[in-house]
Image (tube, rainbow, N blue to C red):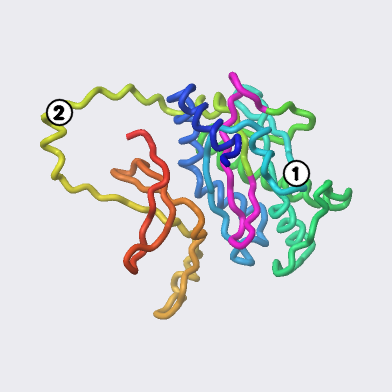
Amino acid sequence: MRDASENAGPLRFATEGEPIRRAAAVLEREQTRLAMALRRALPFLTRRDVPVVMEWTRVISMAELLLNLPRPIHVLHLTVEPGGSPGALVFDAAALARILDGVLGGDGRMLPTLNPAGLSAPQGALVARAVDGVVRAINEVLSARADVRIESAVGRPEIEGGEGTPIVSSFLVGTDESGRVALVLPKDALLAQAPLVPAAKSPDQRVTAALHDIDIELVIELTRLPMKLSAVMALKVGDTIPLEAPVSGTVSIRADDKPIFQGRPTTASGRIAVRIEGGHDR
């Protein structure tokens, strides 16, 4: 049985159309930098080689987002500029456990078991301090790359519908029993800097037919891995480079540097393959 979020997101994309796609594209374009910002704000993730990867970006209400997240959860309300609209940063139970383990100096092997009813006062204080750094790191990326600014806000309302239609990017933190961190931003703030895309004209069928046999190059991007120059120079035959892309995650399929599909890694006839699971407007 499909849950509400699976149906509501595509329905809203269909009804609100191109503005939603342009707003979502802003976050998809910066997915690698945003993932690196999370790792930078929580340095123990880097020390333990914990991957962070964008899982999806879609239209979804706060109620739908929170429906299936494992408890406890931590919701930090944001003020988003331009526009002064509300946003949010949401951490599920597994993400919170990983943060608490890292802040307290654990080794990441035995994450703490949290009370589903909520964090204790000391746990909440530790999480709040760590999350404040995450907000600053994400703001650095968004302000520099998209002219969107975020800051913590106490008591802001949830984003719901209309002008505040929320665009949500979910990030997986870790591989086994991955935690989720969701960045919730209103579409209008993202649209302020998203380039307008002119309506496509119907192609000339004679031109289309003539182009059918032309080869194009598809780029399937598993990951982009930041690595210090010293580490690159130390590489030798036989070394293994772990990729920050879980097998269960999605990859982007591009043509002429434009995203046309989303897929998941798999195998076919003994070779690495990608199964197409979603598309972009072409």
Is residue 65 positioned above or below 195 on the image? below
Quadrant occupied by the N terminus: top right
Is residue 221 positioned above or below 190 on the image? below
Q: Residues within 10 Å of mark 2 (few under 14, many from 20)?
A: few
Q: Secondary structure at mark 1?
A: strand
Task: Please give the label number shown on residue 74.
Answer: 1
Q: Give the residues in magenta.
A: 159-181
Q: Of all residues shown, which one is farthest toward the top? A: 162
In the figure, is residue 2 to the left or right of 102? left
Q: Residue at x 48, y 41 (%)?
A: 28
In the figure, is residue 213 to the left or right of 230? left
The x, y position of residue 260, in whole percent, is 35, 41
In the figure, is residue 202 to the left or right of 58? left
Is residue 264 positioned above or below 67 on the image? below
Q: Give the label, 1 or 2, closer to the camera.
A: 2
Residue occupied by mark 2: 205
The x, y position of residue 235, in whole percent, is 44, 75
Q: Secondary structure at mark 2?
A: helix
The x, y position of residue 166, in whole percent, is 59, 30
Q: Residue at x 53, y 36 (%)?
A: 58
Q: Residue at x 54, y 52 (%)?
A: 53
Q: Residues within 10 Å of mark 1 (few under 14, many from 20)?
A: many
Q: Of all residues shown, which one is farthest toward the right? A: 121
Choose top left, top right, bottom left or bottom right for residue 255.
top left
The x, y position of residue 146, in whole percent, is 51, 34
Q: Nearer the viewer, residue 211 or 144?
A: 211
Q: CA distance from mark 1 to mark 2?
A: 53 Å
Q: Residue at x 83, y 46 (%)?
A: 117
**Which amino acid type is shown beneath numbered disc 2?**
Gln
Residue 268 among magenta residues? no
Q: Are marks 1 and 2 in contact (CB under 8 Å)?
A: no
